[in-house]
Image (cartoon, grey):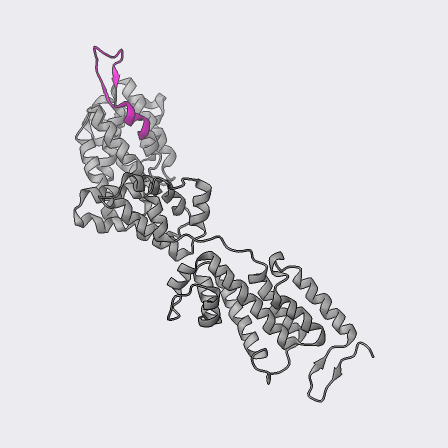
Amino acid sequence: MSNEIELRRTGNVVPTQVESTEVISLIRSRLSYIREDMRDNTYIIEALRVLPVGGYRSAIGAFWNAVVDDLRKKVMFRSITLFNREINVGREIKTYEDFQNYVNDDQLIEGAYKIGVIGWEASKVLKHAKETRHIFSGHPSSSEPSIIKVLGMMEDCINYVLNVDYPMQIIDISEYITQLGSEDYDRNRVAIENALGDLPEHYKNELANRLFTAYIHPDCSTILRSNIEFCMPILWRVLPKEVKVQIVRRVDQEIPRGNTTSISYAFAFVELVGGNMYLSTLARKYIVEPLIVTLNDSLDTWATENRCVSELEPFAGYIPSDLLPMYVNALTQTYIGHIGSSYYHARTDFYADGAALKIPGMFEKFDDEAAEAFVEAVKLNEIIKRRIKNSSKMRRLRSLGNIVLERVSDRFKDRKFLELLVDETKEREFFSLLDQ
């Protein structure tokens, strides 16, 4: 029968004419998924030529050669410099011929993975495909591969290499940092997102750390620092959390060195990328404690209050627990202000205007512990207790109380105190409780 398989005495399968037609149909359907620029590749054409006559071994070998050819070209396009950094073959690889002569398939796959030409999954699948080629094309005495084996190997090669477009050209980190220090640096957000977002993870890590080092150096030029300020937030968004933590914790290394310029720029870098949440307790206390002490001691000195509150604002959600009572007390005093008169202002309700705009937002970062510090400040601070006897100051305190009441949990032990504070109809009851 025409559909039956003729068996040789060796047991090898020889396709019939009908089977050859079916094989060609299957192969052509797979080939339609190969990139347009690879369809006329010599190795692909060779594989198609031998498959109809049962040349499965040769087809496997030819298809693998197409994969290797494509990977070599993609690596060269991506960055041959970074390939040389990642893979040591005993000499520098410069040309396609160098790949042929000195780089084996395992090194090629590993290098392609490390510089981002292929992903982790692709690197594992390709190593399996390479073994398929080694067994069936490199060893003629091995068993005869089936068409299923050939199609499976082809499918993997197409999905992970031959159907995949060329990667973006990767930046050289040293060259990129040099360019950052130039007035010719292209501050195009889309270009930067593509250049930095496409870096392999360990290169993102390296670049971020080198940018931190450059930024905090006292001799960093204003051009370089400005360009870092532009591009670093873009890079920060694509960094894994562990790298963000590692970079922010480098602030702790700068503090003991005592270089105030470097320390100041280190904190500025962290604020630039929004990394305050990753600061250690040591770093938080270093930056916020002097500000809290100054604010607490500068009641009604508006310029100082405005400055301290402005500098504290980025750390509002990250105040160390032992500093919370002084911090909350200082903010509350500053917001309430005092009653007075002035030759220059037609008002009697005075407070630091700049600080007053920021403090409500800082109160919105409160948790139960901060809310407890607020209640204690109202109960124990005699200046606050005296000033809120004035109706305008009581209204200002009440507005803070409303924010705090919305922030506390249902189990907050002083919820009743806050409810009395914010209820204008129970003001007398509130003061009675406060005077106890």
Residue 252: image location, x then y, percent: 23, 50
Q: In which quarter of the image is the C terminus?
A: top left
* Residue beneath the point at 21% across and 49% down: 254
Q: Quick one: 178 or 352, which is closer to the camera?
A: 178
> Does residue 68 sit above or below 296 in this rendering?
below
Question: At 27% from the left edge and 49% from the top edge, which residue is drawn?
Answer: 213
- The location of residue 66, given as percent across then percent down, is 57, 67
Question: What's the residue at 60%, 63% (across, down)?
Answer: 158
Q: Which of 396/282 is in front?
A: 282
Q: In which quarter of the image is residue 404?
A: top left
Residue farthest to the right, as pictured: 1
Q: Is residue 344 magenta?
A: yes
Q: Is residue 95 above or below residue 192?
A: below
Q: 250 or 116: which is nearer to us?
A: 116
Q: How many marks?
A: 0
Q: Quadrant of residue 369?
A: top left
Q: Residue at x 49, y 52 (%)?
A: 168
Q: In this view, does 19 lie to the left or right of 229?
A: right
Magenta region: 337-359
Q: Is residue 283 left or right of residue 15?
A: left
Image: 378 above or below 239: above
Asked if one can make out residue 430 in the rendered structure from this viewpoint, the answer is no
Residue 189 among magenta residues? no
Residue 419: x and y in percent read: 35, 30
**Left or right relative to 198: residue 351:** left
Location of residue 311 (image quadrant): top left
Quadrant in which the N terminus is drawn:
bottom right
Q: Is residue 362 visible to the viewer in this orientation of the structure?
A: yes
Q: Which of 345 and 325 is in front in this view?
A: 345
